[in-house]
Amino acid sequence: MEIDVGSTRIFFCPICDVDTPHSIRAAKAEMYGIMCTNCTSGSIVNEVDLRVYQLKWEEELREILDNLVEHSFESDDE
Ligand SMILES: [Zn+2]
């Protein structure tokens, strides 16, 4: 999975103190320059850190989606 410059990834922002969408501004070797779309503060992160975060979020999203599907089946009875 490529991390493209110009795409957006969820990452922890130390300024906002929460996970926020970051736009990928630059890529060099395994380092990425990212910018928080909330407070526009920039940071440099390792590709591995970005990927770990991506996986973590995909897992959480899958759980949320699974719950939604279960819920919609339940309320489908009427
Ligand atoms: Zn921020």
Image (spheres, grey):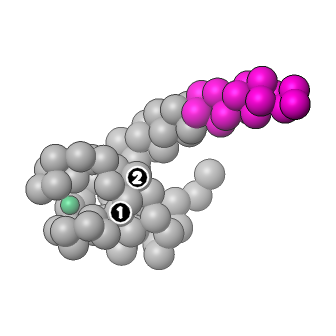
Q: How many marks?
A: 2
Give the magenta range: 63-78
Name the spot of residue 50 as percent of width and height, x first: 40, 47
- Say whether residue 75 is left or right of residue 35: right
Cβ atoms at labels 2 and 1 below 8 Å apart: yes
Name the spot of residue 44 as percent of width and height, x first: 23, 59
Give the distance between the C-alpha atoms of the residues marked 2 and 1, in whole angstroms.
6 Å
Looking at numbered disc 1 in the image, what kind of residue is underneath it? His
Q: Assign the magenta stretch its main secondary structure.
A: helix
Is residue 21 visible to the viewer in this orientation of the structure? yes
Q: Residue at x 58, y 33 (%)?
A: 64
Name the spot of residue 56 as percent of width and height, x first: 47, 33
Q: Given the current orientation, which residue lies at the most extreme front position? A: 78
The crowding category of the residue bearing disc 1, from other C-alpha atoms within 10 Å (few below 14, some 14 to 19, many at least 20), is many
The residue beneath circle 1 is 22
Q: Is residue 72 magenta?
A: yes
The residue beneath circle 2 is 10
Name the spot of residue 7 as percent of width and height, x first: 50, 69
Q: Given the current orientation, which residue lies at the most extreme left position? A: 15
